[in-house]
Amino acid sequence: MAVLPLFFFFFFFVFASAGSSSSSSSTSHVKGVEITEFASPDQRVNLSVYFESLNEPCATFIIKNLVEIFNKDLINIVNLQLVPWANASISNTNNTILCQNGPDECLLNSLEACVLNVSHDVNIQYALIFCFEFLALEGKHKKWQSCFNQLGLPKQPFLHCFNAGYGTQLGRLYVSQVARLSPRFTFLPWVLVNDKPLEKDYENFVSYVCKAYKGPLVPPACHRV
Ligand SMILES: *[C@@H]1O[C@H](CO)[C@@H](O)[C@H](O)[C@H]1NC(C)=O
Ligand SMILES: *[C@@H]1O[C@H](CO)[C@@H](O)[C@H](O)[C@H]1NC(C)=O
Ligand SMILES: *[C@@H]1O[C@H](CO)[C@@H](O)[C@H](O)[C@H]1NC(C)=O
Ligand SMILES: CC(=O)N[C@H]1CO[C@H](CO)[C@@H](O)[C@@H]1O
Protein backbone atom coordinates (compact mmCIF):
# COMPACT_ATOMS: atom_id res chain seq x y z
CA MET A 1 0.00 0.00 0.00
CA ALA A 2 2.72 2.46 0.96
CA VAL A 3 4.79 1.91 -2.16
CA LEU A 4 2.42 3.23 -4.78
CA PRO A 5 1.89 6.82 -3.57
CA LEU A 6 5.59 7.13 -2.78
CA PHE A 7 6.38 6.00 -6.29
CA PHE A 8 4.06 8.62 -7.77
CA PHE A 9 5.36 11.27 -5.47
CA PHE A 10 8.92 10.52 -6.44
CA PHE A 11 8.09 11.11 -10.08
CA PHE A 12 6.15 14.22 -9.34
CA PHE A 13 9.11 15.56 -7.41
CA VAL A 14 11.60 14.74 -10.14
CA PHE A 15 9.29 16.15 -12.79
CA ALA A 16 8.72 19.35 -10.84
CA SER A 17 12.43 19.85 -10.21
CA ALA A 18 13.29 19.18 -13.84
CA GLY A 19 10.90 21.88 -15.09
CA SER A 20 13.55 24.54 -14.44
CA SER A 21 11.69 27.82 -14.69
CA SER A 22 8.25 26.55 -13.73
CA SER A 23 6.84 28.62 -10.89
CA SER A 24 3.42 27.18 -10.21
CA SER A 25 2.59 27.21 -6.54
CA SER A 26 2.42 23.42 -6.29
CA THR A 27 5.89 23.12 -7.78
CA SER A 28 7.59 25.50 -5.40
CA HIS A 29 5.67 23.95 -2.61
CA VAL A 30 6.79 20.45 -3.46
CA LYS A 31 10.41 21.54 -3.55
CA GLY A 32 10.09 22.66 0.04
CA VAL A 33 8.96 19.36 1.55
CA GLU A 34 10.68 16.08 2.18
CA ILE A 35 10.33 13.50 -0.52
CA THR A 36 8.38 11.13 1.73
CA GLU A 37 5.81 13.73 2.76
CA PHE A 38 2.64 14.83 1.03
CA ALA A 39 1.94 17.89 3.09
CA SER A 40 4.08 20.44 4.88
CA PRO A 41 3.65 20.54 8.67
CA ASP A 42 1.29 23.52 8.61
CA GLN A 43 -0.96 21.86 6.02
CA ARG A 44 -1.40 18.72 8.05
CA VAL A 45 -4.67 18.05 9.79
CA ASN A 46 -4.37 17.75 13.55
CA LEU A 47 -5.90 14.53 14.76
CA SER A 48 -5.98 14.23 18.55
CA VAL A 49 -6.96 11.11 20.44
CA TYR A 50 -7.50 11.34 24.19
CA PHE A 51 -7.53 7.89 25.71
CA GLU A 52 -6.89 5.62 28.66
CA SER A 53 -4.79 2.50 28.29
CA LEU A 54 -7.15 -0.02 29.96
CA ASN A 55 -10.36 1.43 28.58
CA GLU A 56 -11.93 -1.03 26.18
CA PRO A 57 -13.52 1.42 23.70
CA CYS A 58 -10.18 3.24 23.52
CA ALA A 59 -8.22 0.06 22.83
CA THR A 60 -10.75 -0.97 20.19
CA PHE A 61 -10.54 2.42 18.49
CA ILE A 62 -6.74 2.38 18.44
CA ILE A 63 -6.56 -1.14 17.04
CA LYS A 64 -9.51 -1.25 14.69
CA ASN A 65 -10.10 2.34 13.52
CA LEU A 66 -6.95 4.36 13.95
CA VAL A 67 -4.99 1.79 11.96
CA GLU A 68 -6.79 3.16 8.88
CA ILE A 69 -4.52 6.20 8.78
CA PHE A 70 -1.54 3.88 8.33
CA ASN A 71 -3.26 1.46 5.95
CA LYS A 72 -4.53 4.26 3.73
CA ASP A 73 -1.52 6.59 3.75
CA LEU A 74 -3.46 9.26 5.58
CA ILE A 75 -0.54 9.50 7.97
CA ASN A 76 1.11 11.69 5.30
CA ILE A 77 -1.49 14.41 5.78
CA VAL A 78 -2.10 14.00 9.50
CA ASN A 79 -0.35 15.27 12.57
CA LEU A 80 -1.33 12.55 15.05
CA GLN A 81 -1.43 13.56 18.68
CA LEU A 82 -2.00 10.65 21.06
CA VAL A 83 -2.90 11.75 24.58
CA PRO A 84 -2.68 8.98 27.17
CA TRP A 85 -3.58 9.54 30.84
CA ALA A 86 -6.77 11.24 29.67
CA ASN A 87 -8.91 10.36 32.68
CA ALA A 88 -6.27 10.25 35.40
CA SER A 89 -6.50 12.55 38.39
CA ILE A 90 -4.24 13.86 41.12
CA SER A 91 -5.22 12.87 44.65
CA ASN A 92 -5.73 15.95 46.77
CA THR A 93 -4.80 14.08 49.96
CA ASN A 94 -1.36 12.75 48.97
CA ASN A 95 -0.72 14.23 45.53
CA THR A 96 -0.27 10.84 43.79
CA ILE A 97 -1.61 10.28 40.32
CA LEU A 98 -4.63 7.98 40.19
CA CYS A 99 -6.07 6.06 37.27
CA GLN A 100 -9.70 5.14 36.79
CA ASN A 101 -8.84 1.46 36.28
CA GLY A 102 -6.21 1.23 38.98
CA PRO A 103 -2.41 0.91 39.20
CA ASP A 104 -2.11 -1.36 36.15
CA GLU A 105 -3.62 1.38 34.04
CA CYS A 106 -1.20 3.94 35.48
CA LEU A 107 1.66 1.58 34.62
CA LEU A 108 0.55 1.15 31.03
CA ASN A 109 -0.16 4.89 30.72
CA SER A 110 3.42 5.55 31.89
CA LEU A 111 4.82 3.18 29.30
CA GLU A 112 2.80 4.79 26.55
CA ALA A 113 3.83 8.27 27.65
CA CYS A 114 7.44 7.07 27.52
CA VAL A 115 6.93 5.65 24.04
CA LEU A 116 5.69 9.06 22.89
CA ASN A 117 8.51 10.80 24.73
CA VAL A 118 11.38 8.60 23.54
CA SER A 119 10.52 7.91 19.92
CA HIS A 120 9.57 10.73 17.59
CA ASP A 121 8.72 8.34 14.76
CA VAL A 122 4.95 8.09 14.58
CA ASN A 123 5.17 4.61 13.04
CA ILE A 124 7.13 3.30 16.01
CA GLN A 125 4.90 5.14 18.47
CA TYR A 126 1.80 3.66 16.92
CA ALA A 127 3.23 0.15 16.56
CA LEU A 128 4.14 -0.06 20.25
CA ILE A 129 0.90 1.45 21.49
CA PHE A 130 -1.05 -0.84 19.16
CA CYS A 131 0.82 -3.82 20.64
CA PHE A 132 0.16 -2.73 24.25
CA GLU A 133 -3.51 -2.10 23.56
CA PHE A 134 -3.86 -5.40 21.75
CA LEU A 135 -2.53 -7.17 24.84
CA ALA A 136 -4.79 -5.03 27.05
CA LEU A 137 -7.88 -6.16 25.13
CA GLU A 138 -6.85 -9.75 25.72
CA GLY A 139 -6.21 -9.10 29.41
CA LYS A 140 -2.50 -9.78 28.86
CA HIS A 141 -1.12 -6.27 29.34
CA LYS A 142 1.34 -7.56 31.97
CA LYS A 143 3.22 -9.09 29.04
CA TRP A 144 3.99 -5.64 27.60
CA GLN A 145 7.73 -6.38 27.44
CA SER A 146 7.04 -8.87 24.63
CA CYS A 147 6.06 -5.97 22.35
CA PHE A 148 9.66 -4.82 21.98
CA ASN A 149 10.77 -8.28 20.83
CA GLN A 150 7.78 -8.69 18.53
CA LEU A 151 8.57 -5.40 16.83
CA GLY A 152 12.34 -5.87 16.91
CA LEU A 153 12.84 -2.66 18.87
CA PRO A 154 15.48 -2.09 21.55
CA LYS A 155 13.71 -1.73 24.89
CA GLN A 156 16.46 0.11 26.80
CA PRO A 157 15.53 3.71 25.92
CA PHE A 158 11.88 3.09 26.79
CA LEU A 159 12.69 1.23 30.01
CA HIS A 160 15.08 3.97 31.01
CA CYS A 161 12.29 6.55 30.73
CA PHE A 162 9.86 4.26 32.54
CA ASN A 163 12.19 3.22 35.36
CA ALA A 164 13.24 6.83 35.94
CA GLY A 165 9.59 7.68 36.63
CA TYR A 166 9.37 10.04 33.65
CA GLY A 167 6.20 8.29 32.48
CA THR A 168 4.39 9.48 35.61
CA GLN A 169 5.90 12.97 35.34
CA LEU A 170 4.62 13.15 31.81
CA GLY A 171 1.28 11.88 33.14
CA ARG A 172 1.01 15.00 35.29
CA LEU A 173 1.62 17.13 32.20
CA TYR A 174 -1.07 15.21 30.33
CA VAL A 175 -3.49 15.68 33.24
CA SER A 176 -2.98 19.45 33.03
CA GLN A 177 -3.35 19.37 29.24
CA VAL A 178 -6.62 17.46 29.59
CA ALA A 179 -7.83 19.94 32.19
CA ARG A 180 -7.57 22.68 29.53
CA LEU A 181 -9.85 20.78 27.14
CA SER A 182 -12.91 22.82 26.37
CA PRO A 183 -15.45 21.31 26.20
CA ARG A 184 -14.32 18.53 28.50
CA PHE A 185 -14.73 14.99 27.18
CA THR A 186 -17.92 13.20 28.10
CA PHE A 187 -16.61 9.73 27.19
CA LEU A 188 -13.45 8.12 25.83
CA PRO A 189 -11.89 7.90 23.32
CA TRP A 190 -12.31 11.63 22.72
CA VAL A 191 -11.26 12.34 19.16
CA LEU A 192 -10.72 15.82 17.73
CA VAL A 193 -9.95 17.03 14.22
CA ASN A 194 -8.30 20.46 14.26
CA ASP A 195 -9.49 20.85 17.85
CA LYS A 196 -13.12 20.12 17.00
CA PRO A 197 -14.49 17.14 18.98
CA LEU A 198 -16.14 14.49 16.82
CA GLU A 199 -18.13 13.29 19.82
CA LYS A 200 -20.13 10.12 19.00
CA ASP A 201 -19.09 10.21 15.36
CA TYR A 202 -15.43 9.55 16.18
CA GLU A 203 -15.26 6.26 14.26
CA ASN A 204 -15.81 8.30 11.07
CA PHE A 205 -12.70 10.39 11.70
CA VAL A 206 -11.33 9.68 8.21
CA SER A 207 -14.04 11.72 6.50
CA TYR A 208 -13.45 14.65 8.88
CA VAL A 209 -9.72 14.50 8.21
CA CYS A 210 -10.28 14.46 4.46
CA LYS A 211 -12.72 17.39 4.61
CA ALA A 212 -10.29 19.41 6.70
CA TYR A 213 -7.31 18.75 4.42
CA LYS A 214 -6.52 21.62 2.03
CA GLY A 215 -3.01 20.62 0.91
CA PRO A 216 -1.70 19.05 -2.30
CA LEU A 217 -1.68 15.39 -3.29
CA VAL A 218 -4.92 14.29 -1.71
CA PRO A 219 -4.47 10.62 -0.65
CA PRO A 220 -6.59 8.04 -2.51
CA ALA A 221 -8.53 7.26 0.68
CA CYS A 222 -10.01 10.77 0.52
CA HIS A 223 -11.40 10.36 -2.98
CA ARG A 224 -13.82 7.77 -1.67
CA VAL A 225 -15.31 9.69 1.24
C1 LIG B 1 -3.16 8.36 47.98
O1 LIG B 1 -4.53 8.66 48.16
C2 LIG B 1 -5.42 7.85 47.40
C3 LIG B 1 -6.84 8.34 47.66
O2 LIG B 1 -6.94 9.70 47.32
C4 LIG B 1 -5.24 6.39 47.80
O3 LIG B 1 -6.08 5.58 47.00
C5 LIG B 1 -3.79 5.96 47.62
O4 LIG B 1 -3.60 4.64 48.07
C6 LIG B 1 -2.86 6.91 48.35
N1 LIG B 1 -1.48 6.56 48.00
C7 LIG B 1 -0.48 6.61 48.86
C8 LIG B 1 0.87 6.25 48.33
O5 LIG B 1 -0.65 6.90 50.03
C1 LIG C 1 -13.29 9.10 34.58
O1 LIG C 1 -12.91 8.51 35.80
C2 LIG C 1 -13.87 8.66 36.83
C3 LIG C 1 -13.33 8.00 38.09
O2 LIG C 1 -11.97 8.17 38.23
C4 LIG C 1 -15.19 8.03 36.43
O3 LIG C 1 -16.16 8.27 37.41
C5 LIG C 1 -15.65 8.60 35.09
O4 LIG C 1 -16.78 7.90 34.64
C6 LIG C 1 -14.56 8.48 34.06
N1 LIG C 1 -14.98 9.15 32.83
C7 LIG C 1 -14.92 8.56 31.65
C8 LIG C 1 -15.40 9.38 30.52
O5 LIG C 1 -14.51 7.42 31.48
C1 LIG D 1 -2.19 22.02 14.43
O1 LIG D 1 -1.52 22.14 15.66
C2 LIG D 1 -0.39 22.98 15.64
C3 LIG D 1 0.23 22.98 17.02
O2 LIG D 1 0.32 21.71 17.55
C4 LIG D 1 -0.80 24.38 15.24
O3 LIG D 1 0.35 25.18 15.14
C5 LIG D 1 -1.53 24.34 13.90
O4 LIG D 1 -2.01 25.61 13.60
C6 LIG D 1 -2.69 23.37 13.95
N1 LIG D 1 -3.30 23.26 12.63
C7 LIG D 1 -4.59 23.46 12.41
C8 LIG D 1 -5.02 23.34 10.97
O5 LIG D 1 -5.38 23.72 13.30
C1 LIG E 1 12.28 14.24 23.84
C2 LIG E 1 11.43 14.58 25.01
O1 LIG E 1 10.31 15.00 24.89
N1 LIG E 1 11.99 14.33 26.17
C3 LIG E 1 11.29 14.58 27.42
C4 LIG E 1 10.85 13.28 28.03
O2 LIG E 1 10.35 13.50 29.33
C5 LIG E 1 11.26 14.08 30.23
C6 LIG E 1 10.65 14.09 31.61
O3 LIG E 1 9.42 14.78 31.64
C7 LIG E 1 11.62 15.45 29.75
O4 LIG E 1 12.57 16.05 30.61
C8 LIG E 1 12.20 15.35 28.35
O5 LIG E 1 12.44 16.61 27.83
Image (cartoon, rainbow, N blue to C red):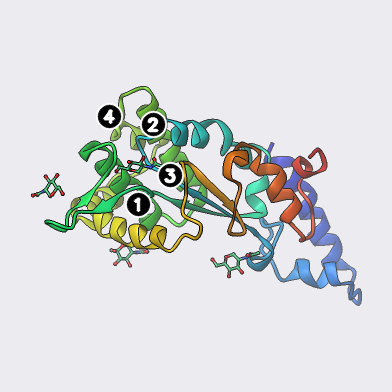
The amino acid on which the numbered mark 3 sits, given as a three-letter code, is Phe
Q: Name the residue beneath numbered marker 1.
A: 113
How many labels, in total?
Answer: 4
Looking at the image, in which quadrant does ligand 4 appear? Answer: bottom left
Marks 3/2: CA distance? 24 Å
Q: What residue type is labelled 2?
A: Gln
Residue 89 in view in this figure: yes
* Of pointers 3 and 2, the one earlier in the residue sequence: 3
Name the N-terminal-most of marks 3 and 4: 3
Looking at the rendering, in which quadrant would you find the N terminus? top right
Q: Residue 51 carries which label?
A: 3
Amino acid found under the numbered disc labelled 4: Lys
Q: Circle 4 is placed at which residue position?
A: 143
Viewer-nearest of discs 3 and 2: 3
Element assignment for label 1: helix
Q: What's the CA distance linking mark 3 and mark 1?
A: 12 Å
Q: Residue 92 carries which label?
A: none
Say above or below: 56 vs 79: above
Quadrant in which the C terminus is drawn: top right
Q: Is residue 148 left or right of residue 122?
A: left
Q: Distance between the residues labelled 4 and 1?
A: 17 Å
Tell me which numbered mark, 2 or 4, is placed earlier along the sequence.
4
Q: Is mark 2 on a helix, strand or loop?
A: helix
